[in-house]
Amino acid sequence: MGFRGGIIGTLVLALIVWILGGNPMSVFQDITSPSQSPSSNVTAPVAGSDEMGEFVRVVLADTEDVWHKIFSESGETYREPTLVLFNGGIRSACGNAQSSSGPFYCPADERVYIDLDYLQLLQQRLGAQGDFAAAYIIAHEVGHHVQKLLGTLDQLDRLRSSGASESQINEMSVRTELQADFLAGVWVHHGQRMKNFLEEGDIEEALNAAAAVGDDKIQMATQGQIQPDSFTHGSAAQRKAWLKRGMETGDVSQGDTFRDLNISRR
């Protein structure tokens, strides 16, 4: 059971490298190079005492308040994920992750791993600026944890072990990631009602961040062409639309991406 969400960081980092004039394929070569020791460049978690670390903890606490409420209203108990802040690399129950992986969720240990340097790089280089752009990413990873508790992550794992084709697995991955976007939106909807935490421009920051990590935008920037069959997270339009739907409805039952994607993959 692999970590969820990490490929976002890999693709975004490739785009950042391209923006800075480098070779984006070097990112993937660094990750897949067989000469690299599994434990190299892996560092211990950081305390996260800086401003960004504190911001991450505040956002996570807000997600916990919302999901405790939603689960309680359904007669269920929300089990909180564990937050791990790191820089450079980390060893998780789902394997080793380098900084290029970005934030990710590991269902095997129910931990949300947040690379603080990555969050700053995302805002500085990709244009996904603003605190709420980072909040969306954190809420997206928490969305994967909610999927783990609801059992929806199991669908992708069963498909992977069934001998399904790569295109079928990619399609299921897209649906899984879009639902995590939707669940991030659900958090925004209820969090605003509970705490009135939104400031002017926050919604736009989150939606812009969701669109910025769309597969089509990243593929066009790094490859010069778009290949929908290789999408693993969804297009910019899909990601933005599902996040927005979660924000508008706040209804978990409205986020069944496994039944209807609703928006064309183009």
Image (cartoon, helix red, strand yellow):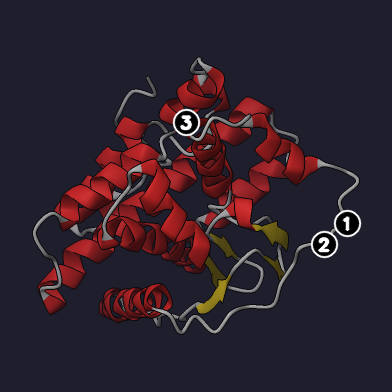
Q: CA distance from mark 2 to mark 3?
A: 28 Å
Camera-near label (2 vs 3) is: 2
Earlier sequence position, callout 1 versus callout 3? 1
Q: Is residue 95 above or below residue 256?
A: below
- Residue that label 1 marks: 37
* Labels 2 and 3: the sequence-earlier one: 2
**In front here: 235 or 174?**
235
Residue 18 higher or lower than 255, as above or below: above
Q: Horizontal placement of 259 versus 223: left or right? A: left
Given residues 239 and 262, the one toward you in this image is: 239
Q: Label 3 belongs to which residue? A: 218
Residue at (71, 72) in percent of width and height: 43
Residue of label 2 = 40
Q: Position of residue 233 (x, y in %)?
A: 48, 39
Query: If the image is split into quadrants, where does the C terminus sit?
Result: top left
**Tag 1 secondary structure:** loop
Q: Is residue 245 visible?
A: no
Asked if the residue under mark 1 is in contact with the one under mark 2, i.e. CB atoms within 8 Å, the reply is yes
The answer to whether 73 appears left or right of 106 in the picture is left
Q: Examine the image and state in which quarter residue 133 appears.
A: bottom left
Q: Going by the image, does 76 lie left or right of 227?
A: left
